[in-house]
Image: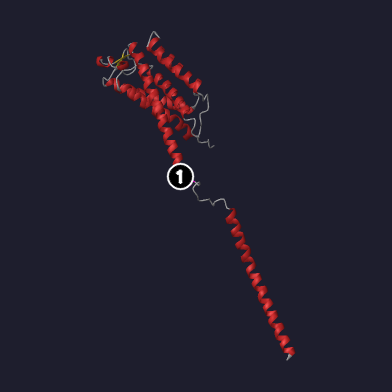
Amino acid sequence: MPRLENCSWSCSCTARGRHKIQLESTTAPLTAKVGEMLSSSVSSPSLTLVGPGARSPSTSSTSSTLNLSQHLVQRSVVLFVVGAFMALVLNLLQIQRNVTLFPDEVISTLFSSAWWVPLCCGTAAAVVGLLYPCIDSHLGEPHKFKREWASVMRCIAVFVGINHASAKLDFANNVQLSLTLAALSLGLWWTFDRSRSGLGLGITIAFVATLITQFLVYNGVYQYTSPDFLYIRSWLPCIFFSGGVTVGNIGRQLAMGIPEKPHND
């Protein structure tokens, strides 16, 4: 009997030890796996704190959108005011030199200009000034040539000088004057812009503005003295080209605070 008891006890201990070893070998990988999951979840950067000081991504994106909208409105207002003021001053110069002729009731108004002249020119300046940096960002070619306000002010002075020359200079014919103003306009682009987008937009603006002016003159809204190019002066596209480049530089300078799209080769 003692031998049987010792044998049964030893067998039961052996079986219990084997069962324990099997349990340990089974639970060890599970324990290690759970530990890895807990450590990775604790160290994961995707977990964010929720509290009164935390900001959700949707809130930050909304605030950035509002800031961009406010900046866009401010730039539009500044460009509109600049365009309207320049239109009043330059149009007054053209009227005093008898280059453009308005009806008699218009001459007695403020600045001897029709009400729609500053309105249309201000709106056009806002559109062009916003379009230049937008095209630069879309093409991935940020404009960085002479990006300072001193250069912009010199560009405005040269544009005013070109407009003044169109009314003051006397040539044998309008073709010589047109070639001179064309050279001055290209010189303005080369001095203050030198970008393909600026050249392309300047030519497009000159073409569209010339068509609109011809339509207005054809319908008798106002007229030019000594027209030599489909009811208008042949040098008028040069004025529109240099004006587009000037307003574009102003718009680019106002958009300096907006991050620009990098160029992708």
Q: Quadrant of the C terminus?
A: top right
Magenta span dominant secondary structure: helix
Q: Residue at x 39, y 21 (%)?
A: 240
Residue 107 appears at what percent x and percent y? 28, 14
Pointer 1: residues within 10 angstroms few (<14), some, or many (20+)? few
Where residue 181 appears, x then y in whole percent?
A: 43, 15
The quarter of the rendered structure image containing the N terminus is: bottom right
Residue at left 41%, top 30%? 74
Among all residues in the image, which is located at the extreme right?
3
Name the residue carrying label 1: 59
Q: In this view, does 194 lie to the left or right of 206?
A: right
* Viewer-side residue, 46 vs 252: 46
Q: Quadrant of residue 83?
A: top left
Name above or below for residue 100 compared with residue 1: above
Specify start and end residues of the magenta stretch as a single range: 55-61
Comparing 54 with 263, the one in front is 54
Q: Where is residue 146 in the image (x, y as percent from the top left)?
A: 52, 24
The residue sitting at the bottom extreme is: 1
* Residue ranking furthest to the front: 52
Is residue 32 visible in the rendered image? The answer is: yes
Q: Where is residue 8 in the image (x, y as percent from the top left)?
A: 70, 86
Judging from the image, the colouring scheme is secondary structure
Classify residue 86 as left or right of residue 34: left
Question: Which SS class for mark 1?
Answer: helix
Say what amino acid the circle numbered 1 marks: Thr
Decide whether residue 126 is among the magenta residues: no
